[in-house]
Image (cartoon, helix red, strand yellow):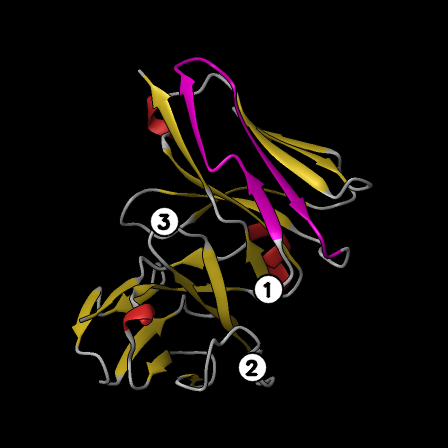
Amino acid sequence: GAGVSQSPSNKVTEKGKDVELRCDPISGHTALYWYRQRLGQGLEFLIYFQGNSAPDKSGLPSDRFSAERTGESVSTLTIQRTQQEDSAVYLCASSLEWALANYGYTFGSGTRLTVV
Amino acid sequence: QQQVKQSPQSLIVQKGGISIINCAYENTAFDYFPWYQQFPGKGPALLIAIRPDVSEKKEGRFTISFNKSAKQFSLHIMDSQPGDSATYFCAGGDDKIIFGKGTRLHILP
């Protein structure tokens, strides 16, 4: 597609429920990133996929968070047993690995997650 | 996570003035320093970026100044316009990017 697509755009869930957030990167982009943005805060790195390499999971805040990516396409971020502190906008970005230094990331518009 | 520290948190500038946002980084392995602009309800968009072997980069009204020895860099917006009102994030990284906490810029008409 023309840009990074995220779904749903908004999600309200009850505390303790599991949620899945989806990201469709730009076609051909080998690198995919997930970030979390709490209200009025900066972007917090969560996880990074690059091709067939093992993902960099160093930013995941707890074992309730996990992510998968099938090849160089869609990625799903799963949050189990959601807590109120998980409320945030979850942003996905993709890039061509070789072009990161010249073109940076392209971000989606994010999924706004509200845990009630 | 390696930190990128950004200041000020918020900034108000008169139309036509110069907006200046400063950042400092810790990780000397970083080889890429972008600035992103974010409007409410949207994802961040790349504004301008610099590599550490360059001390300054200018694109239109936007200039990055980079001081490798001090591990600091800044964004200057010349002739600031109301349409520049947004949140600006500095960042640094190599294979992944670490972001500052952002500066909310408001340009008075």
Q: Residue at x 18, y 76 (%)?
A: A13
The mark nearer the N terminus, 3 or 2, is: 3
Q: Residue at x 71, y 46 (%)?
A: B51
Label 3 and label 1 in one chain: no
Specify the amino acid type for callout 1. Answer: Lys
Name the residue type under label 3: Gly
Residue hosting label 3: A40
Up the image or down, B43 lies above or below A5; here it is above
Furthest toward the right, the residue is B69
- Between the C-alphas of marks 3 and 2, the distance is 28 Å
Q: Residue at x 29, y 66 (%)?
A: A87
Q: Give the number of the disc on residue A64.
A: none
Residue B26 magenta: yes
Question: SS at mark 1?
Answer: loop
Packing grade of label 1 (10 A; few <14, some 14-19, many >=20) is many
> Circle 1 sits on which residue?
B96
Q: x and y percent of residue B3 in the render?
A: 62, 56
Q: Chain of mark 1?
A: B
Q: Amino acid at mark 2?
A: Pro
Magenta stretch: give its range. B4-27
Q: Chain of mark 3?
A: A
Say which mark, if any, is on residue A55. Answer: 2
Q: How far is the residue under mark 3 from the one under mark 1?
A: 22 Å
Instruction: For mark 3, give the secondary structure.
Output: loop
Is the Cβ of the residue at disc 3 closer than 8 Å to that at disc 1? no
